[in-house]
Amino acid sequence: MPQRHLAILLSGLALTSLAGCASLVPHDDTSVAPAEQSQQALERATDCCSTLAALPYQSLAVGESQSLTLDTQAPMHRFADGASYFQAFELPRTREPLTFKLTSTIANDQVFAPTVLVLDEDFQPTQRVASDKFDYLSPNGFAGARLGATFDITPGPDAAYLVVYSNDAARQGTTQYESAEKVYARVRGLALPPGPDPIAEHTATGNVTLESEARKTSGGLLTPILGTRSHADSVTADTGTDASRSEHAAPSSGDSNNASAPDFDYRRMIDAALKADDIELAMQLAERAEREGNSGTRAWLAERLRSVSP
Amino acid sequence: MRDSRQFTRRPLLAALIGASCVMPALAHADINPNFFGYARSGIGSTAGGGSQTCFKAAGAPAKYRLGNECETYAELGLGANLFDQQGTSFDFASRVAYVTSQANDDESLKDDGNNIALREMYVTGTNAVSGLPEGSTLWAGKRFYKRHDIHMNDYYYWDLSGPGVGISDIDMGIGNLSLAWVRSSGSDSDNLPDENQRLSDDTIDVRLTDIPTNPGGSLQLGVDYGRASLSDWQKDYYDDTGVDYDEGDKGWMGTIEHTQSNWFGGSNTVALQYATDGIITSNGNAVGRGSGSLEQEGDMWRVLDHGQVWLVPDKLDMLYTAIYEDKNMDDNSGRKWFSAGVRPTYYWNDIMSTAVELGYDHIEPQSNVTGYDGGDHHVTKLTLAQQWSAGRGAMVRPTIRLFATYAKWNGDAYQDRDAEGYRQAHALDAGAGPNNVDFNDTDGLTFGAQMEVWWGS
């Protein structure tokens, strides 16, 4: 066996060893501040803004996964339901229905329990995904334990801005979770690691990822009728900033996410809407029809409106 | 509230949409299947020519696996929660395992070396037995039963898998008690006139787990008793033919294991095992159930330690293991086995890492071993692998890795071919995959690529 092969392998080992010359120290994700420390920092932090209108809004990158900085360097605001670090976004003005997926990962027995607030164009809260609407998702070989929710928003006058934050009530809670080792053991039929499942504190800071994409499936058909809604029924109407009034979601009357309506007869639907004197809906349907390739529907509706007008 | 309010304002539309969308939703069965599994596959070559050789010390029950697996192996599992009311739940799980020699595209699972096997088919009933503490689980069917393994060398040191019945995780206050009856039938084609008359090897497993000992640490104790369950006519037959099955078909094994979590960011497990006679597995790595032998007498000690630590948080972790096993058989067919290995992995970023695995196996046979080098022999293996994974951590998958493995051993690799033309083990096991180093080589180099994945929740 040529000795140079061994030399290459040993060089690799040496390089790797050099990279890791360090004493044994407990594993600690340095990007996550201890819970108490981040809570104290939050209490000391200065409110960035006097009103919701003054929050620093970033434009939303649709179709991308954004890692939200929710550490002690993030802006802080005293919301109606408590102070919190936050990230705020201006929704695109395309009025294209969007699906959002918000994930908050559990690290070092800590997790940021998010609340999502949707504001209208006058910066008034209109909808909310409360922190208890986020489901616990166990590790699965591709991702660690995390909290997650998926919800739909159609940007418009009632949904112009989105804020991700946490509140006092959420930070009183905890989430019990399974370690990746435990799930691996269950999947492989191994003896489960001993001991109780760890408990994550809900903390003032954390690692949150926001993904958004345009809803392109025909299931989006229901969106103009249903308004914004959550896949998990988690977007609820919010007439004020009091969280306690918006904890209960309406049961869904149909799963728009999975609905499919091939060759849907838009013109018949629009006729029905006109008969019900719902011109707003008729227009929304026409827009939707145009987007799905039924060109001429808008002009056809205009013609219909002219013919029914006095 | 917004949703329902809008619907009531538009009854006609609600009806229209309802007609088009609600029916499919109702067609969904109220079962959420759980798809889970594990798989590995790849390609490799041996320097000098030929497909990938896998280096395993002859007589050792395991080999260090990084860059040293020559087969495609997969487990596909399907399960479902079937009932969950008032604290009682019933769950079903099944698993089929596949193995092929990874030789070409269309590999029949009936060919030599390939296999498809039904590994699990069982139901658990959690809190199904009233009067028992919360969490007690009744189960029946064939399953992987609380297997204890070392990932680095794919070594299972306590494995009662098979068809069975049991009740597990009864909270006794000091720990959780689990009781099981499992079967591992053998056959005695040499002696029994009818090969279909199997030897039913039954094992009773009693274990007390999750006994808290120190912060983050817990102990578990286990006893397995196994024996061949012979029918009267089988006993008569062996009595007539002079086969002494009084001791050799029975055996017991005791296990004491301590697991420490919060151990440098990972965990450490140390185990001590003692086993006697018929429960010792002479080859392979499953131990703790009846072996199917009628005349196997002797005893075995084993001590092992394994775990994972983070040497530099989020940058460098390491798997490690050390095993010492002494099988002292009355017919001198046993051996001592010492094994040690480390696998440090450096994470360049969330996706790419470099892993190095250094493993050593030493075999010291008793005087009467057959089929491989009767003298002391050892294999040292070093693998360098560049990996792309879905995150950081020794058990994070999927992983795609490129590897190169250098192995060195003492003495000839193989013995001359047997009557059927197959190479025989000498320092190296001849059954661990293609054997593409020469008979008298004392080292070898292989390289290739492999993927490894597990999924499920």
Image (cartoon, coloured by chain):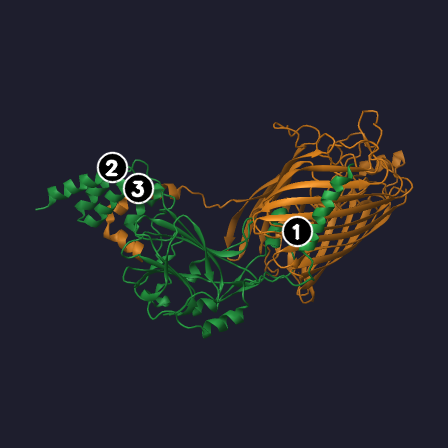
Label 3: state its secondary structure.
helix
Which numbered tag is attached to residue A295?
2
The answer to whether residue B183 of the structure is visible from this angle is: no
Can you say whether B215 is above or below A146 in the image?
below
CB contact under 8 Å: marks 2 and 1 = no
Which chain is displayed in green in the rendered image?
A: A
Tag 3 subunit: B
Residue type at numbered disc 3: Ala
Residue at the extreme right of the image, as rendered: B367
Which residue, given by chain and number where applicable, does mark 3 sit on?
Answer: B19
Write down the quadrant of residue B223 in the picture: bottom right
Amino acid type, mark 1: Thr
Question: Residue type at mark 2?
Answer: Ser
- Whether tag 1 and tag 3 are in contact, CB under 8 A, the answer is no
Query: Within 10 Å of the Cα at label 2, are there few (<14), some (14-19), or many (20+) other Cα atoms?
Result: few
At horizontal 70% and vertical 53% (from top left) the residue drawn is A17
Give the chain letter at badge 1. B
Horizontal placement of B19 versus B170: left or right?
left
